[in-house]
Image (cartoon, rainbow, N blue to C red):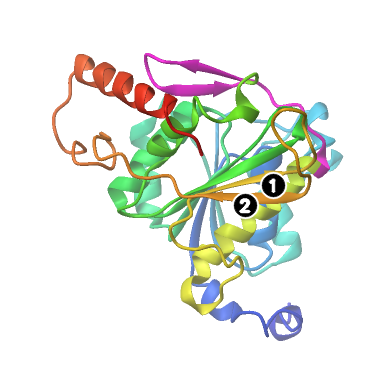
């Protein structure tokens, strides 16, 4: 592989040498995560792909996944590593099969040892998002996470940065005011976590959001060297509309930007983060957050 030739068409945008020194965790190798891994892996970023044990590519995945029939019945993460290397033989890709929720300690151990510059959260399980978020806040690592709305009408990319609002703050702020997810998300108010049902969407819907997600992640990795988004540092939520939806999304193919404030009472990133908490403390805190968010709009 001749790297000078390989990178020749993009060298004027950023220095590939600097990007190859960056380390990125991508959690979740589903339809969205596979696209994010494909785009960033081909650029040479050192990757750690994390997926649950036993996650095999099934036939119904193929219509929306980056992998094809040649990977049918094989582990998604391992096959994605091969897929990425078929585009860039110099890319370093590690794979870890971890149930992030069931084995939080192992996730923390592996992620800490890898020392990522950024974490891309591509899991569709809300509890797993919170586990990743809590680790990132504790370690001072920025993250970007994505989700596609049911029907593929649009989706969101959230951004967390050290000393700013964590994913828990963003999720709490949105859970009552986010119109586009009212009918597609079940909210457990005893935990404050949303559990999304399987999302029905076309590959082009998922691709649209995955590319925005990947662009934001790439810009975070490059830092001040190259700004690929123009998104102000205070923005931590991007909502993109693929097409109109009566009563929720009026304009197609556009993005809205939001700055969700940090909740000072948050047990993850706020002033309560390092205090001992009881179940009653948490339930009282969630009740207060719910009352506040009911009176707020994005």
In the image as oriented, which residue stretches furthest toward the left? 276
- Name which quarter of the figure residue 199 lies in: top right
- Name which quarter of the figure residue 46 lies in: bottom right
Cα–Cα span, label 2 and label 1: 6 Å
Q: Measuring 20% from the left and 20% from the top, which residue is drawn there?
A: 281
* Residue 90 relative to residue 50: left or right: right
Tell me if I can see residue 37 in this picture.
Answer: no
Classify the position of the N terminus by image quarter: bottom right
* Residue 69 relative to residue 199: left or right: right
Name the element at disc 2: helix
Q: Measuring 69% from the left and 67% from the top, which residue is drawn there?
A: 89
Residue 112: image x %, image y %? 34, 50
Question: Dot 2: few (<14), some (14–19), or many (≥20) neighbours within 10 Å?
Answer: many
Residue segment shown in magenta:
185-204
Residue 237: image x %, image y %? 52, 47
Q: Contact, CB < 8 Å: mark 2 with mark 1? A: yes
* Residue 70 relative to residue 109: left or right: right
Residue 195 part of the magenta segment: yes
- Name which quarter of the figure residue 31 lies in: top right
Disc 1 target residue: 209
Residue 279: image x %, image y %? 23, 16
* Residue 261 relative to residue 268: left or right: right
Residue 139 part of the magenta segment: no
Tell me if I can see residue 98 in this picture.
Answer: yes
Question: Dot 1: few (<14), some (14–19), or many (≥20) neighbours within 10 Å?
Answer: many
Which disc number belongs to residue 170? none
The total number of labels drawn is 2
Disc 2 target residue: 213
Name the element at disc 1: helix
């Amino acid at each position: 592989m001749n790297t000078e030739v390989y990178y020749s068409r993009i060298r004027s945008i950023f220095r590939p040498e600097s990007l190859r020194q960056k380390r990125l965790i991508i959690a979740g190798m589903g339809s969205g995560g596979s696209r994010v891994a494909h785009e960033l892996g081909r650029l040479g970023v050192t990757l750690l792909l994390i997926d649950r044990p036993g996650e095999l590519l099934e036939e119904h995945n193929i219509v929306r996944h980056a992998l094809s029939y040649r990977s049918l019945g094989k582990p998604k993460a391992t096959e994605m590593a091969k897929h990425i290397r078929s585009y860039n033989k110099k890319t370093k890709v590690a794979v870890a099969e971890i149930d992030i929720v069931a084995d939080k300690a192992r996730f923390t151990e592996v992620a800490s040892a890898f020392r990522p510059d950024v974490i891309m959260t591509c899991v569709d399980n809300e509890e797993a998002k919170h586990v990743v978020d809590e680790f990132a806040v504790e370690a001072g690592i920025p993250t970007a996470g994505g989700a596609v709305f049911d029907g593929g009408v649009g989706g969101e990319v959230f951004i967390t940065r050290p000393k700013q609002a964590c994913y828990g703050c963003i999720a709490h702020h949105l859970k009552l005011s986010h119109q586009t997810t009212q009918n597609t998300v079940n909210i457990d108010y005893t935990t404050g976590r949303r559990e999304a049902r399987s999302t029905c969407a076309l590959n082009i819907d998922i691709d649209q959001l995955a590319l925005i997600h990947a662009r934001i992640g790439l810009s975070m990795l490059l830092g001040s060297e190259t700004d690929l988004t123009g998104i102000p540092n205070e923005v931590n939520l991007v909502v993109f509309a693929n097409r109109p939806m009566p009563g929720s999304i009026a304009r197609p193919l556009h993005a809205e930007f939001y700055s969700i404030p940090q909740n000072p009472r948050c047990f993850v990133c706020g002033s309560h983060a390092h205090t001992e908490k009881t179940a009653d403390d948490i339930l009282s805190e969630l009740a207060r957050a719910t009352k506040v968010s009911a009176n707020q709009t994005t």
